[in-house]
Amino acid sequence: MARPLRSLLHGLLLILGVTFISFLLMVWFGPDQTFTLIGKNATAERIAEVRHELGYDQPFLKRYADFLVELATLDLGLSNSSGERVSRMLARSVPVTLALMLPGFLLGNLLGIAFGLQAAQRRGQWSDRVISSLSVTGMSLSFLIIIIALQVLLSTPQGLNLFPVRGWQVVDLPSYLRYVTVPTVALLIVTLGYNTRFYRAVFVDEFGKDHIRTARAFGASPAVIMWKHVLKNSMVPIITRVLFSIPLVVISGSLLIESYFGIPGIGKITFEAITNGDQPVLKAVVALTAVAFVLIQVTADLLYRLVDPRVA
């Protein structure tokens, strides 16, 4: 019981530290909307009034304390651009992003594990060389180029014209599959190369350990060696890879995909907040992403101990 509590305490301290640094960067280097809201030729009194309304005239520590309260209660204020509550914007956009990114994320990891096992088991053979070459090719391609190529190939009259070019009019499973297919294929092409290379390196290292040679000497079948010994003993790096990819895929991947395809998820909201200098939205996205990383760290620490009792 002490270990989970200690991990939770460390997580809370990390959240405080990460949110403080994030808030500091947003305050000192983030967009200042004062002159965006008041326009040109404003009087000093009007400038001071707007800065007071935005909370810019408050002491830094008070602003940070208020921000922690907002974060804890998920009452994240109002968007400076639209006037909508930030929490409502996130509640509307996060499910869209998860529905959009989850298929590619899961397929990218599952196929990466499968191809990595196949390549590691046949290290140096033609199948290993083919998988490694395709992985490097996928890693070298630009995400934007892949998106444009797939859109032209699958979504325009010049290509197959099977899927929508833009938008997110999802009302049922068939419409969901129509809108999610092209982004999923694009994400899969990009992430599969990186995942396969990573998992192959993990499995190659595991195949070379003494307990694998011992299992072979005692007549264990290739299937038992692969599933019972190699995969099971590789769960710590697999968990690390999967969990810590989540915030990156949700924020970074969706930022490009949703902006390009016009999908109303968290990536599109973040892009619009950056271009409009919408500080409440940016602070919420940055802070919640930081909190997600910390929570994932705590979750990973707990899962490590479940899959490998040797982890202290």
Image (cartoon, rainbow, N blue to C red):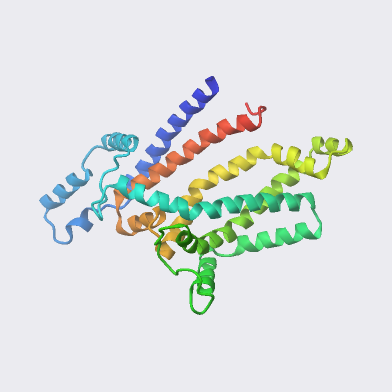
Q: Nearer the viewer, residue 86 or 160?
A: 160
Q: Position of residue 234 (x, y in %)?
A: 69, 40
Horizontally, residue 235 falls left or right of residue 173, namely right
Q: Measuring 35% from the left and 47% from the top, which residue is drawn there?
A: 91
Task: Say above or below: 182 vs 242.
Answer: below
Tally the marks.
0
Q: Position of residue 253 (x, y in %)?
A: 49, 56
Task: Say above or below: 14 vs 238.
Answer: above
Q: Position of residue 9 (x, y in %)?
A: 46, 26
Q: Measuring 23% from the left and 58% from the top, which residue is drawn there?
A: 36
Given the current orientation, which residue lies at the most extreme bottom position?
A: 158
Horizontally, residue 91 falls left or right of residue 213, namely left
Q: Measuring 52% from the left and 25% from the top, which residue is drawn there?
A: 4
Q: Position of residue 194 (x, y in %)?
A: 62, 54
Horizontally, residue 253 falls left or right of residue 94, namely right
- Quarter holding the C terminus is top right
Q: Measuring 39% from the left and 40% from the top, which residue is drawn there?
A: 21
Given the current orientation, which residue lies at the most extreme top position?
A: 2
